[in-house]
Image: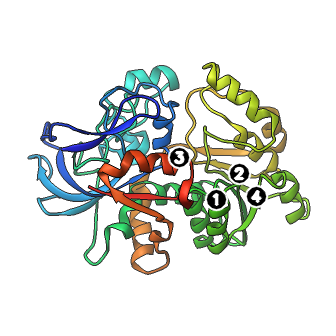
Amino acid sequence: MRGVTYHGTGDFRVDTHPDPIIGHERDAIIRVTSTAICGSDLHMFDGFMPEMKTGDIIGHEFMGVIEDVGSGVGNLKKGDRVVVPFTINCGHCHWCQNKQFSLCDESNPDAEKLAAITGQAAAGLFGFSHLYGGYDGGQAEYVRIPFADATHLKVPDGLTDEQVLFLSDIFPTGWQAAMNAEVKPGSTVAIWGAGPVGLFALKSCLLLGAERVFVIDDVSERLAMAKAHGAEVIDHSQVKPYDALMELTNGMLPEKSIDAVGLEAHGTGVIDTIYDKVKTATMQETGRPHVLREAIMCTQKGGILSIPGVYAAIVDKFPIGAAFAKGLTFRMGQTHVMQHAPTLLEHIQEGRIDPTFLITHRGKLEDAPDLYETFRDKKDDCVKVVLTP
């Protein structure tokens, strides 16, 4: 089979790999019909994710048709159409029983490695380094799905791939970001990042009844998309977000903030971004937390800061004093996809949201290396890429 393959920083290629096979009774094999490039994939592309190995298959947003199942999978059969959550969950451990699926205790065979860094290991993830299990990803023609009886969402008849593909990650991620921020009718929310997760966070906040949602970015096409979908937009290349938010909220600031950017944040004319570039280049810091710092300053006293943007290991100059003085609550973490996906599937079926609004670029699997650069560099108004193997 063909798959998008890691060969080092900035070097993804489409290579030939052995077809996957059933290795455990709870495995299934899926023939991928649609897959997507996610902003989190750029962390591998740009060299920010440790424990990547040459030959790793990338990708964690995918869906398709079941080709084979292990003897222990009683709820799937050949021909079933499924979306696969990027978080692999066993369905039985303490965390899965509490619907905290991204914290699964059983699905990460590299748990000791990750626990040495974080204290406790989280779930295995598709295509996301050997800290998270070293599983082959979904930017391929076929994928082995471990714990397949728990790690899937069946697709009802009448829905296209593009309507449901994003239930694998970014739609539940945006929704969880809003839920973690406790968005409710009348809320005022600020979202940093008008990429795919930020835009789904915007849509989720509005579905939950938010009165005002501010979206902060500096890419005009993304800001235009956010505005078209109900946001008040702030171009941080033209104005300081703090100043703009103070003016727009009459000095109150938003009571909910969402960092949908994460460790690869860029700032415009801000001194801390230069500091972070030097620190990350010399491996003294594993991310650029400019947005995190800014969101702390811009969140109302007593407010909630929700962080769906990925951070790895260590960041510097974290303003814990400001967060403490303002009494902020932080909520973060990988998405519990299967906790939210059934609700979001209902929203799609009832016509409350059409997730396809996000797609700007489509291609074949062989187009992936070029489309990674287009997506990373935001060329050609690129917001979201969908690939069809």
Q: Are marks 1 and 4 in contact (CB under 8 Å)?
A: no
Residue underneath mark 2: 304
Residue type beneath disc 1: Glu
Q: Residue at coordinates 66% horizontally, 28% vertically from top-left?
A: 315
Q: CA distance from mark 1 to mark 4?
A: 25 Å
Residue underneath mark 4: 235
Classify residue 181 as left or right of residue 89: right
On the question of residue 164 being in view, the answer is yes
Estimate how packed mark 3 is, as few (under 14), some (14 to 19) or many (20 or more) residues with alpha carbons within 10 Å.
some
Residue underneath mark 3: 376
Residue underneath mark 1: 182
* Figure quadrant of residue 41: top left
Q: Are marks 3 and 4 in contact (CB under 8 Å)?
A: no
Q: Residue at coordinates 50% horizontally, 51% vertically from top-left?
A: 375
* Residue 300 badge: none
Under circle 1, the secondary element is: loop
Classify residue 261 as left or right of residue 160: right
Under circle 4, the secondary element is: strand
Q: Earlier in the sequence, mark 1 or mark 2?
A: 1
